[in-house]
Amino acid sequence: EYWQKDKKRAPDYDKLVESIIERINHLTKTTRGFMKFTDLEQLNLQPHDVNTLLDRILNEYSAGIPDDITLKREFAPDLPKVNLDEEQFKTAMENLISNAINAMDKGGTLTITTSMAHKLHTFKDETCYREYVQIEVMDTGKGISPQNIEKLFQPYFSLDKKGTGLGLTIVKKIIEDHAGIIEVQSEEGMWTVFTIWLPV
């Protein structure tokens, strides 16, 4: 009706409708993200081969990876199994992989690496070295500033205007629920690497 009354302003109305639809879609994504965040209480832990799970996840993703992005898998052989909730682990890795791909809008290389690592672990005021399976998700994208790295895992903080700001919050919660550790390092304009340590 409005379009018929004022055809000159039709483009403005179109933009308004597009803006409203975009806002609704964003709110829907945020709500779904929040529901995921609040639905992470129960862990179904089973011993899993991390390399096998990562292969499965990457195989599902590979068809949708742009042609100008190279995917590399550098998996250490004979890693010990880790007690994981498969679905939650998949959610965490999909978030990290998706973020890495989005960071390389001009192409680049996505490298997923696994290895064994020893890291200091503190429990009840006692510190000792503990064995971990280490996973690295590295991209050669735009990088992240030191100021933004400090905020990355905060709820509703996002470097993507279309993002909900809950993805990395969910990732951190999942890893910590598995008694794991996650850290991020980055060089602006060069690369970003998320490192996960999962206890053996």
Image (cartoon, rainbow, N blue to C red):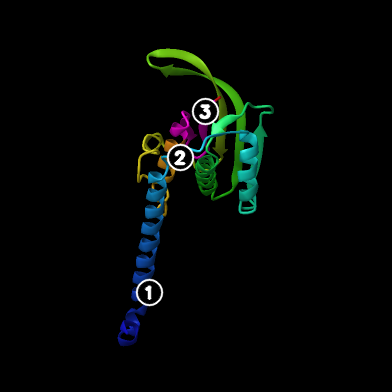
Which residue range is magenta in the image? 175-199
Of 2 and 53, the residue lying toward us: 53
Q: In this view, does 58 lie above or below 81?
A: below
Kind of element beneath mark 1:
helix
Q: Mark 1 points at which residue?
A: 14
Distance from disc 2 to disc 1, alpha carbons, whole Å, reads 37 Å
Crowding at dot 3, Cα within 10 Å, few <14 / some 14-19 / many 20+, comes out as many
Q: In this view, does 182 lie above or below 170?
A: above
Quadrant into which the N terminus falls: bottom left
Q: Where is residue 111 in the image (x, y as percent from the top left)?
A: 61, 38
Q: Mark 3 points at which residue?
A: 197
Q: Where is residue 27 in the image (x, y as percent from the top left)?
A: 36, 58
Crowding at dot 2, Cα within 10 Å, few <14 / some 14-19 / many 20+, comes out as many
Label whose residue precedes the other's in the sequence (3 or 2): 2
Kind of element beneath mark 3:
strand
In this rendering, the label closer to the viewer, 3 or 1: 3
Distance from disc 3 to disc 1, alpha carbons, whole Å, reads 49 Å
